[in-house]
Amino acid sequence: MKVVKIDKENWAEGIEKIKESYKVFGPSKSKEFHLFKELEKGEAPDLNFLNTRLSPKSMFFPQSEGILCYCLDPNKKDECNIVKEIQKDYSPKAIIGIRPCDAKAFTLVRPNFDNEEYQDPYWIKAYDSITFIGLACSNTDDSKKGMPCSSCFCTSAGCGPFNEEGLDALIVNTDDGYIIKALTNKGEEFLNKAELSANSNADELTANINTLKKQAEEKINSFVETDKLKDKILLDLHSANFWDDECFACINCGTCTYVCPTCWCFDIQDENYGDSGVRFKQWDSCMYPLFTLHGSGHNPRSTKVQRFRQRFMHKLKYYVDKYDNGIQCVGCGRCIRLCPVNIDIRKICNIMNSYEPAA
């Protein structure tokens, strides 16, 4: 696959070329925070950032998405009570500047939306329309943005600051240019359409990437232990005596679930207006009591501790047992940084990994 290094002066020109073939999304600063947005003409992605507060998962899993529409007017006999699919825009899109942890996260989510028994056409078509251009956490000077955060623990969560899973190309930001490494045919096509070419000594550039990767991984100094989770007996962890203490401060606000790139809880709601209506798929959270409230009035997770336990058991035990693909977490650290009561998934993970039931 192609590896090139371009001058930063040529970057904006390449981005404008790309916009002729893709809708381009990238990080942009809004007040004091960065977020992913569609880039307008003349606008380039701002790659001088730590990480966004929300991952770009909403590009293929919107917070609120109309999926079906219907008519309830009995006078319109050809349309009344007929459910129709809402047309979507699945034209080619490119996300530039996504962090490797977020791209890896979406590969963990995909088995929920795309498996042998069930396929979510909205998620799959939207995801497959996107070319993912990652931005490595490459700066090794502590004064610069792009460093792994102090709450990042990606290297012990099956990921890393240069992880390539889920990416079509990887950008490495250096002092004198951008090294861009194509990883898939979609990534190579992206480079060709951007007409980005300059220094292309692949061996030299690959060696440079490997050096920066090692330096970035050495900067990660926060870790979790996960090696014993798969062998733990599920009911031992479920009935363990530490859940009450660990959930004491939790206020079930759901912030951790909304900022998590691997959380996928959603609800289906019909909204009627006059003689028509729309069926929506909306983000939801396992931290809310209504999420599991049955029509009968029964709620299997009616208490705070049950919902708190569900979040961590799902990510660190149920997912591990079901998919045998590591934990359902990439170590991005968002839930740690944004939790209003300082609940730390690293602590919970290590407690679960080392837990031994009383004899």
Image: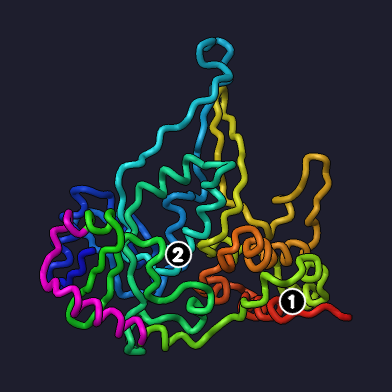
Q: Is residue 227 above or below residue 194?
A: below
Q: Residue at 67% x, 57% y: name it.
A: 286
Left or right of 245 in this view: 193 = left
Q: Is residue 195 above or below residue 222?
A: above
Q: Position of residue 308 (x, y in %)?
A: 72, 66
| Residue identified by numbered label 2 | 104
Q: Of discs 2 and 1, which sits in the foreground?
A: 2
Residue located beneath label 1 in the image: 246
Is 185 rendered above or below residue 153?
A: above
Q: Are marks 2 and 1 in contact (CB under 8 Å)?
A: no
Q: Position of residue 12 (x, y in %)?
A: 17, 64
Identify the residue at image location x=62%, y=77%: 227
Res. 317 visible in picture: yes
Within 10 Å of disc 1 (Cα), the crowding (few <14, some 14-19, many 20+) is some
Amino acid found under the numbered disc labelled 1: Glu
* Nearer-the-camera pick, 72 or 259: 259
